[in-house]
Amino acid sequence: MTEQLDMTRAPPVLDIDPFAVENLRDPYPFYAALRDTAPVVFIPAHNMYAVGRYEETRTVMTDYARFTSEGGIGLSDIRKPGAWRTPSPITEVDPPRHTPIRGALTKVLSPIVIRRWREVFTEEAERQAEALPKNVDLDAVRDIVQPYVLKVFPDVLGIDMPREYFLPLGEMNFNQLGPNNDLTKRSVADSASILEKYATYFDRSSMIPGGLGEQIYAAEDRGDFAPGTGGVQVRTFLRAGVDTTISGIGWALYYLATNPDEWAKVKADPSLAKNAFEEAIRLSGPASCIFRTTVADMEFSGLHLKGDTKVGCFLGAASRDGRQFPEPDAFRVERESAGIHMALGAGAHICIGQNIARLEAECILSALVRRIDRIELTGTPAVHPINTLRTLETLPLRLVAH
Ligand code: HEM
């Protein structure tokens, strides 16, 4: 028997479906089993490998020579017939082809652009925080987070799509990155009428003057992107930047409500709002699972992996790995984990919008913390089960202000 075929060293089977609704609602037992079982496991339900320990997750996310993004960052292999989603021209391309595309987008997101966005985010955060009812029961997802992100982000992107389309489309996109299960099928059916017109919102003629979309098209005209790909780049920003940020800010409010001592620290020093967001996405990473594909049979962490097989990187499991983070389950606003936790990915594809997400979060959290004495949970929060997005459906709370 050759080294490669020594199946005694195959990753052990973990017979859990991470995309079953009960595991999406509460993924932590699965994450613990994933980390405790082995550096890599095999999940038969989806014919995939999975990693959840910090070191292996980071390696699979970054080592594109062995773990390619070109098969897609979801479970379906976009290069094969039967794939149930269309590829992104930045996330699903490996270096060196990825490098100039990433460079062109980084140029579009220049510090001058971001400075102007800070003004837009601050103004809207202050306006909305001021208008929020105090000392009454509300749902923070519906009343605070969604109205804020759905106002500021499409505005700066310069997209004129009806705001009620964003959430069903986001749900569909993040379901489609997982298996073609009931969640995916239902969300595709729910978005069917929107999808008929979807592409037209990314046409050059639909871009609002002064927005990022317009600048992406200008970059295409300069030859920075392949002709005809500007619209798909704009769509990638929309797909990547709305639901993730809604999720992250929602979790930040959840952890601040359930950790009053940590809220008090942010209240005393609002500059800690940034860390609160970072801790929230470490503990409840919005992008819960990102895939790579093995390029060939290989040895990895002492185990033999087969080529051409999907590897699910469970970022939320890695960001709570006790091998990397002391007291991994504790929300500590003084912890400095930015750039270390895995919520924003790592390596060549690390989130290009990370500073925008941070800025959005910082503006709304600091606008709230300056007006509110404390936040109290008034009911049981509910998770919205979506295959690869960990987000809240409801967060009942009261903004207490005297
Ligand atoms: C808390 C909020 C966010 C989270 C948790 C998040 C998470 C991630 C992760 C994990 C990746 C890496 C994907 C991979 O390696 O395959 C990524 C990439 C990306 N993100 Fe974000 N993201 C967030 C916000 C945003 C925002 C606001 C934008 C747009 C302004 C954005 C745009 C992108 C793009 C375009 C990529 C692809 C980069 C590349 O492939 O080079 N993201 N994001």
Image: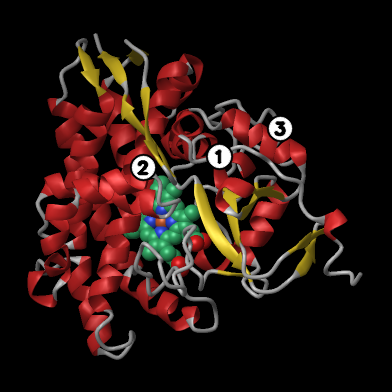
Residue 223 badge: none
Quadrant of the drawing holding the N terminus? bottom right
Q: Nearer the viewer, mark 3 or mark 1?
A: 1
Callout 3: few (<14), some (14-19), or many (20+) C-alpha neighbours within 10 Å?
few
For this view, does 308 lie left or right of residue 107? right
Q: Is residue 321 above or below residue 393?
A: below
Percent position (x, y) of residue 176? 37, 54
User: Which amino acid, mark 1?
Assistant: Asp
Q: Name the residue under label 2.
A: 182
Task: Name which of mark 3 and mark 1 comes first in the sequence.
Answer: 1
Q: How far apart are marks 3 and 1 (CA)?
A: 28 Å
Residue 7 visible in the picture: yes
Query: First in sequence: mark 3 or mark 2?
Result: 2
Q: Which residue is drawn at 50% across and 16% down?
A: 261
Residue type at mark 3?
Pro
Residue at (89%, 69%) from the top-left corner?
A: 3
Residue 266 in picture, x, y percent from top left: 44, 26
Give the image quadrant in which the ligand numbered 1 is located. Answer: bottom left
Label 1: state its secondary structure.
loop
Q: Badges 3 and 1: C-beta atoms under 8 Å apart?
A: no
Q: In which quarter of the image is residue 354?
A: bottom left
Task: Tell me the SS state at disc 2.
Answer: helix
- Disc 3 and disc 2: Cα gap in Å? 38 Å
Q: Disc 1 to disc 2, how far (Cα)?
A: 13 Å
Q: In this view, does 76 lie to the left or right of 226?
A: right
Where disc 3 sits, the SS reads loop
Q: Nearer the viewer, residue 316 or 263?
A: 316
Neighbours of disc 2 within 10 Å: few (<14), some (14-19), many (20+): few
Residue under label 3: 326
**Camera sees residue 356:** no
Q: Name the residue under label 1.
A: 17
Three-letter residue code for mark 2? Asp
